Amino acid sequence: MSKSLKRVTAALAAAGLDAQPMEMSAETRTAAQAAAAAGCALDQIAKSIMLKGEVSGRVILFLTAGGNQVDLAKAADLAGEPLGKADADDIRDQTGFAIGGVAPLGQLHPVRAFADPRLKEFDTVYAAAGTPRHIFPIAPADLLRVSGATLAAFTK
């Protein structure tokens, strides 16, 4: 088991959740791949979009429903600073995860997080579990709790 997957598994257990990461037979790097692997609707995938504060230099996590896109202006208003794309090194340094497997919990360093209200329309959503082949099911309310995400409108 990878270090990233161990961190996610431990964080889920520490949060009192019974959710177990599932290894998929195909990659789950994209929302479409994850939805196909899980056999769920595209919007049931809690996509981890990482943006970087241009003033703070910190990455910020935007959890979106799989079919939605982040509106950069709305996201910047929420963050209180201009945002740009976070690069792979920034993401790995601050979260401990590689692009394609960024989990909403278990980061090396806590990150600010915002969540798309669309995710609350489902009983269960699926999020990355630290690797490009692992996802885990979770109730949206639990996802908000364990990620520390603030529910906010930031999509197009």
Image (cartoon, rainbow, N blue to C red):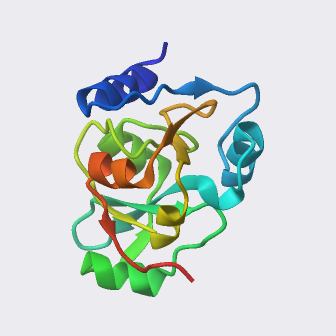
Task: Indicate left or right for 133 with 2 as reference.
Answer: right
Q: Residue at x 52, y 53 (%)?
A: 123
Task: Indicate left or right for 33 with 54 as reference.
Answer: right
Question: Is 4 situated above or below 28?
Answer: above
Question: Is 22 situated above or below 41?
Answer: above
Q: Position of residue 72 (x, y in %)?
A: 47, 80
Q: Position of residue 140 (x, y in %)?
A: 43, 54
Q: Residue at x 55, y 58 (%)?
A: 122
Q: Nearer the viewer, residue 76 or 6?
A: 6
Q: Nearer the viewer, residue 91 or 4?
A: 4
Total residue callouts: 0
Residue occupying the far front of the picture: 123
Task: Indicate left or right for 25 with 64 as reference.
Answer: right
Question: Is 146 situated above or below 8?
Answer: below
Q: Position of residue 10 (x, y in %)?
A: 31, 23
Q: Position of residue 76 (x, y in %)?
A: 35, 81
Q: Is residue 82 visible?
A: no
Q: Nearer the viewer, residue 8 or 141?
A: 141
Q: Nearer the viewer, residue 79 or 93?
A: 79
The C terminus appears in which quarter of the rendering? bottom right
* Residue 81 image-quadrant placement: bottom left
Q: Is residue 98 visible?
A: yes
Residue occupying the far top of the picture: 1
* Residue 73 image-quadrant placement: bottom left
Q: Residue at x 31, y 39 (%)?
A: 107
Question: Is 10 situated above or below 112?
Answer: above
